[in-house]
């Protein structure tokens, strides 16, 4: 029990309820932020519409909210903004046409890497060369016990050190 | 002659001196002339001295408002406080490159001095450069000098920090106020130092290739220097996150901005290097791969250095038009082609000494680790350069932002965490399924417990839940490793704490590594927690309250004050917890600097609530004449874990890199003195 105390402490710490998770923001406001997160603020260096304090980003957030209140779909709102400011405001490149590349290349390169690693492992583990492990003569348990005792002995001597 | 002229002259002189030293070191090596090697070493020191002079001259010009220099005019002004003017040194491209070069020239001297001290401690009589164990050093010197020369060429002839203006303007343009924050005094120099230090492990790799000695000898110094560079770069990245969080005011700490990305990529490949190097040390495997990682990390660091202050990633045109662009790409090409050719030439000597005996082994764990880390690096690199590719190919600009990186890297990061939980429990060569299952029992139980708790808290999305469980697994795995080690020593009769201390001291690398793993868990917890951010924009009249998350903010009043050359408005708020208890007073402010009126700077008020560990993060957007104030408020759960993780990261790397005691040197101090005299004479 005593030994497991740090683990328990950790569990207790992890159990502390985070106050933020308990609360509810209105679903609509959350959706505004969600949409704004996927759009680049057109006048900023590299901030999303959700994060940017600029005038334009504020107007765009208000616009998203108005259209949501009017019952428009997320797609329609984003499309309207893209028509106005260009495809360059999409922080999440569309999964179609040329920008499909940006999504697939990491996946492909990872798959390729996995293939290489897999093949290398296969080749290595299947080489018929005399396996050192197998070739090593089995040690009798008696011998093993003797070695263990010697090891413990020498470890203890080392620990005490030459001072 | 003004000090700036002197600096310019020193910088221009450094180039031929460096060139001489490079030629001397190569000739000395080829002809076997020790005198030339020693002369090359002196040249290396002289370059460091000259670049130091140039740097001091630039500092002096900034301090004395020498606006006849374009650099001083562009990046400072009379209104700026002294300390802020010093940060102007690395506020622009030329100064940043000068800092890089200055750092490398000093580090190169340090590498040589360090080697000399080791030789002296071993009692080597005479010049240490002639000691057999120091044989790679002249090669290392030559590579470092080559890199320095390239930068000296850029600084002297392409992008000089000492460029004059045709006439002297009365005042400078000043520095972007966002860059005047105290965080900026540390973060950019740290990253530039990190980028620059990746040169040393690269130099050792090239030295090993050039000499054809590709056994374990080169790994030890390369690992040590890589660990140093990796630590500095890691701290730089964390400092950057901290600065973004505390200064930029958008409630986050990492924006997947190109400049951040290019700093992260070499750090990822360096992480892969530090892991794979263990496979080569232990088993003599993956030799080509380890070398390739050292080269790639350096090339990516050069790429990052180039990108960091040039804004070239914003468009193809600025990329092509940047005056230093072609040179950087030429240099990068040279590095990559040269290294690859050398690698191919030495391929016959790079055969694996052994093989992977079983799929379930530590070796496989490291291979997967490398696959994931390099996969992440490739994904981030691709996302960063894709907008350029798109513009070049189709002529349309696209943005690749946070959603892309989160979706691509999220699964990889979770896989990496899971591997971090399993890997340390795998034995070298071969682990039986049963042994692994036994070792994994406790960590898995912890992971399930954490998963249940997090699920109870309302995290139901698969990946977040899996990540939280993976964190539990890592903590469990590290705990099991320590428990095993300590218990073995306790059986030998040691008490708990001494057992722990000797366990760590006996294998610093390994246990430092585990501490770094724990730090990564803390950072992961911070990242996961901050995903549950709550955000609200409030407009309040004095005395009014509003609810954000389960916290209540009461706006008290606002007042104006002139501070540090800026007009500032301060708002006072009171923060109350879920039960209505008063937690803290918050004072966000908003400053307007002269020359930068369109870009007001927010002083953000952050309070970490205890025991919930939420950051309540308040930004003052504006206050009108009627004292109504608008605030942007965020509640960021667990972000504090990021910074705690950062400190733990530093502790772990310090444990891992703490030099081993050298018993030989300590045993015979009396004998050393005369030899020291000989060595310093030489």
Image (cartoon, rainbow, N blue to C red):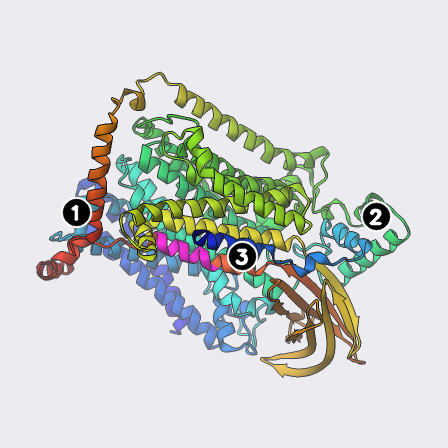
**B668 and B61: which one is in front?**
B668
Quarter of the figure with residue B43: bottom left
The subunit letter for the residue under badge 1 reads: B
Magenta range is B647-656
Categorize mark 3 by other alpha carbons within 10 Å: few (<14), some (14-19), many (20+).
Answer: some
Check residue B161 in the rendering and tell me which mark sits there, or answer none: none
Q: Give the residue pinned by disc 3.
A: B309
Task: Residue B509: give x, y in percent of width and height.
Answer: 35, 48
**B636 and B588: which one is in front?**
B636
Q: Give the residue pinned by disc 1.
A: B131
Categorize mark 2 by other alpha carbons within 10 Å: few (<14), some (14-19), many (20+).
Answer: some
Q: Report the label total.
A: 3
Q: Are the residues flagged by discs 1 and 2 in contact, CB closer than 8 Å? A: no
The subunit letter for the residue under badge 3 reads: B
Task: Residue B392: give x, y in percent of width and height.
Answer: 64, 40
Check residue A77 in the rendering and tell me which mark sits there, or answer none: 2
**B440 and A25: which one is in front?**
B440
Instruction: Give the residue drawn at x 74%, y 76%.
Output: B555
Above or below residue B606? Residue B260 is: above
Residue B441 located left or right of residue B553? left
Quarter of the figure with residue B298: top left
Residue at the far top in the pictured view: A128
Q: Are the residues flagged by discs 1 and 3 in contact, CB closer than 8 Å? A: no
Asked which secondary structure carries label 1, the reply is loop
Does the magenta portion include B655? yes
Q: Nearer the viewer, mark 1 or mark 2?
A: 2
Categorize mark 1 by other alpha carbons within 10 Å: few (<14), some (14-19), many (20+).
Answer: some
């Amino acid at each position: 029990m005593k030994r497991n105390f740090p683990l328990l402490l950790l569990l207790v710490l992890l159990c502390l309820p985070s106050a933020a998770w308990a609360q509810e923001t209105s679903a609509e406001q959350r959706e505004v932020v969600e949409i704004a997160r996927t759009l680049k603020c057109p006048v900023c260096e590299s901030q999303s519409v959700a994060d940017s304090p600029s005038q334009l980003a504020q107007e765009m957030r208000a616009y998203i909210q108005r259209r949501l209140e009017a019952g428009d779909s997320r797609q329609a709102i984003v499309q309207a903004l893209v028509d106005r400011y260009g495809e360059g405001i999409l922080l999440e490149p569309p999964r179609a046409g040329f920008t499909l590349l940006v999504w697939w290349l990491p996946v492909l390169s990872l798959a390729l890497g996995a293939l290489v690693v897999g093949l290398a492992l296969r080749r290595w583990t299947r080489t018929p060369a005399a396996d050192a492990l197998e070739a090593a003569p089995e040690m009798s348990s008696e011998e093993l016990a003797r070695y263990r005792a010697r090891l413990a002995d020498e470890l203890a001597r080392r620990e005490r050190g030459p001072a | 002659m003004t000090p700036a002229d002197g600096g310019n002259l020193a910088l221009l002189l450094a180039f031929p001196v460096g060139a001489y030293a490079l030629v001397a070191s190569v000739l000395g090596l080829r002809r076997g002339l020790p005198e030339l090697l020693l002369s090359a070493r002196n040249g290396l020191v002289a370059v460091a001295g000259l670049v130091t002079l140039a740097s001091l001259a630039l500092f002096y010009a900034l301090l004395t408002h020498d606006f006849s220099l374009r650099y001083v005019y562009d990046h400072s002004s009379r209104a700026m406080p002294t300390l802020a003017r010093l940060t102007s040194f690395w506020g622009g491209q030329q100064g940043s490159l000068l800092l890089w070069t200055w750092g490398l020239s000093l580090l190169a001297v340090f590498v040589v001095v360090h080697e000399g001290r080791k030789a002296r401690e071993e009692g080597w009589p005479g010049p240490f450069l002639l000691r057999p164990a120091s044989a790679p050093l002249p090669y290392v010197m030559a590579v470092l000098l080559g890199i320095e020369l390239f930068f000296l060429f850029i600084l002297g002839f392409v992008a000089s920090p000492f460029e004059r203006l045709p006439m002297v303007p009365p005042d400078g343009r000043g520095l972007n106020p966002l860059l005047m924050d105290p965080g900026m005094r540390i973060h950019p120099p740290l990253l530039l130092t990190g980028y620059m230090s990746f040169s040393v492990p690269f130099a050792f790799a090239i030295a090993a290739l050039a000499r054809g000695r590709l056994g374990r000898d080169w790994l030890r110094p390369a690992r040590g220097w890589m660990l140093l560079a990796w630590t500095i770069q890691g701290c730089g990245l964390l400092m950057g996150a901290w600065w973004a969080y505390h200064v930029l005011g958008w409630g986050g700490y990492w924006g997947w901005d190109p400049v951040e990305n290019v700093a992260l990529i070499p750090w990822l490949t360096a992480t892969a290097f530090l892991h794979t190097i263990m496979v080569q040390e232990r088993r003599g495997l993956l030799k080509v791969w380890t070398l390739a990682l050292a080269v790639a990390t350096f090339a990516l660091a050069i790429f990052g250095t180039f990108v960091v202050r040039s804004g070239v990633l914003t468009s193809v045109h600025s990329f092509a038009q940047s005056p230093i662009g072609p040179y950087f790409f030429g240099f990068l090409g040279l590095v990559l082609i040269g290294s690859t050719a050398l690698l191919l030439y030495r391929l016959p000597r790079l055969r694996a000494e052994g093989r992977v005996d079983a799929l379930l082994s530590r070796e496989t764990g490291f291979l997967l680790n490398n696959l994931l880390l390099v996969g992440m690096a490739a994904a981030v690199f691709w996302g960063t350069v894709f907008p350029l590719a798109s513009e070049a190919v189709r002529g349309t600009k696209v943005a690749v932002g946070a959603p892309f990186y989160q979706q691509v890297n999220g699964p990889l990061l979770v896989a990496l965490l899971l591997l971090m939980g399993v890997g340390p429990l795998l034995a070298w060569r071969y682990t039986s399924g049963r042994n692994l299952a036994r070792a994994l029992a406790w960590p898995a139980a912890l992971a399930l417990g954490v998963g249940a708790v997090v699920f109870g808290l309302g995290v139901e999305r698969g990946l977040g839940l899996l990540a939280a469980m993976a964190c539990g697994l890592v903590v469990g795995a590290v705990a099991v490793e320590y428990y095993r080690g300590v218990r073995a020593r306790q059986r030998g009769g040691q008490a708990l704490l001494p057992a722990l201390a000797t366990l760590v001291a006996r294998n610093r690398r390994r246990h430092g590594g585990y501490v770094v793993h724990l730090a990564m868990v803390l950072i992961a917890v911070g990242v996961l927690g901050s995903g549950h951010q709550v955000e609200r924009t409030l407009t309040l009249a004095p005395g009014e309250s509003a609810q954000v998350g389960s916290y209540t903010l009461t706006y008290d009043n606002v007042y104006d004050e002139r501070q540090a050359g800026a007009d500032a408005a301060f708002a006072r708020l009171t923060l109350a917890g879920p039960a209505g208890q008063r937690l803290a007073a918050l004072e966000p402010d908003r400053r307007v600097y002269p020359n930068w009126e369109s870009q007001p700077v927010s002083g953000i008020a952050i309070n970490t609530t205890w025991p919930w560990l939420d950051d309540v993060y308040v930004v003052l957007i504006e206050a009108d004449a009627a004292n109504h104030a608008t605030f942007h408020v965020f509640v960021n759960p667990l972000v504090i874990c990021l910074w705690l993780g950062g400190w733990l990261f530093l502790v772990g790397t310090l444990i891992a890199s703490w030099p081993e005691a050298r018993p030989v040197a300590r045993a015979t101090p009396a004998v050393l003195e005369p030899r020291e005299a000989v060595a310093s004479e030489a």
